[in-house]
Image (cartoon, grey):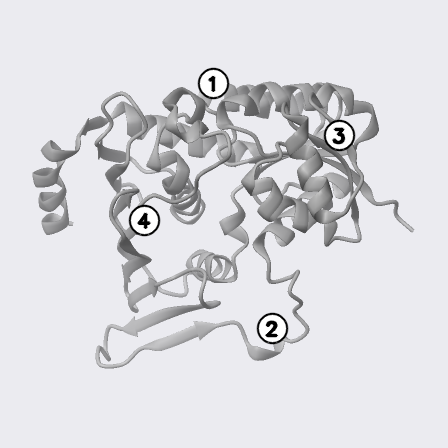
Amino acid sequence: MTEPYRIAIVGAGMIAEGSHVPAVLGSPDVRLAALVDPEAQRCRDVAERFQVSPKICTDVAAVLGDIDAAIIATPNHTHSAIAMACIRGGVHCLVEKPLAATLAEGEEIAAAADEHGVTVAVGYSSRFIDAIELLGDLIVQGFFGAIHRFAYQFGTRGGWNPASSYILDRKSIGGGVTVVVGTHFIDWMLTWFGYPDEVTYADDSLGGPEANAAATFQYRHRPTPLAGTMRLSKTVALPPGFVMETDRGTVSLEDKSLAAHVILRPRDATDCEMIVRRPVEMAAGRTARSSNNFARQLDDFVAACRTKAPPRVSARQGVESLRLIEALYAARTPLPEFAARFAEHEATA
């Protein structure tokens, strides 16, 4: 029988307590060997809540010889140093999204992982949500025919308040709403469509983290040119969703968390809609664990570590997300000045 993988969770904040610790404790293939946080009391509080007794320490260096892998769930600007320490110690890493605070740091992590033969996965957990997985498979299979344009939006009034408040510091987070929220969609977009040929971007940052952002993406070198938009907000509640115009009709993913299906409104039957989902027999036998995206992410990561196969979201994919995020910020214009250009793009797309 294979011994359980010894995992340390580095960072005892909200994402660790709410998602990573339950995923680890629910898996028969892994063991929570350590909790690491500069504030050891946080680790003790988490351990007490879950009634577990891992090793508790304030520096990952203290456990490198006692673990097989680490989940790095710390503020973005700390990812690089922790990941590099793990990689040099031969410890595999699942790094919460984004991979690092800068493209240069992300490239360093990916290169070191290759050099040391260590698996590094990036925590784009939404890639493991049933509806996202299904839509990605259908796009790759060409189920909808040519795709002509797409739009994504997500907005809430506030939300996500980590214990350290690091998201209020642009240097700590690497940006604002585009990094906190948009990076998940950017990961999907790169996976489904590849890297865009041209981008425009605007936000309301005045030197700190932006609360509102809008972007356009142009794919001019595909067999069928493709245009897309993204709108993000931390001050306005926007109905969450993704929609795209295709040869077969309009495809929408109205709320990724509610159902494992995609809606298709056929081009030749606009008064009806089709629900596209996996066959019922494929869903039979699914457990709460196999339906939990953080649990599935962990299972994929451990399998990659054991078999040396690439994880679903590799370090190199994490680097491409950082590359596009930095390209967006480099193209930044103030949000009010962007409104007319955004409307013009919508009209001509």
Instruction: Choose the circle earlier in sequence order: 2 or 1.
Output: 1
Q: Mark 2 points at which residue?
A: 283
Tell whether 1 sits left or right of 104: right
How far apart are the alpha carbons under marks 3 and 4?
Answer: 35 Å
Residue beneath the point at 9% across and 44% down: 344
Residue 46 x, y percent position in the rendering: 67, 41
Vertical arrangement, residue 99 with respect to residue 227, above or below: above
Instruction: Choose the circle earlier in sequence order: 4 or 1.
Output: 1
Residue 309 x, y percent position in the rendering: 69, 42
Residue 119 visible in the picture: no
How far apart are the alpha carbons under marks 3 and 1?
Answer: 31 Å
Task: Check if mark 3's residue and mark 4's residue have beta carbons within 8 Å.
Answer: no
Circle number at residue 56: 3
How far apart are the alpha carbons under marks 2 and 1?
Answer: 42 Å
Q: What residue type is labelled 1?
A: Ala
Residue beneath the point at 73% across and 19% down: 61
Residue 114 visible in the picture: yes
Circle number at residue 156: 4
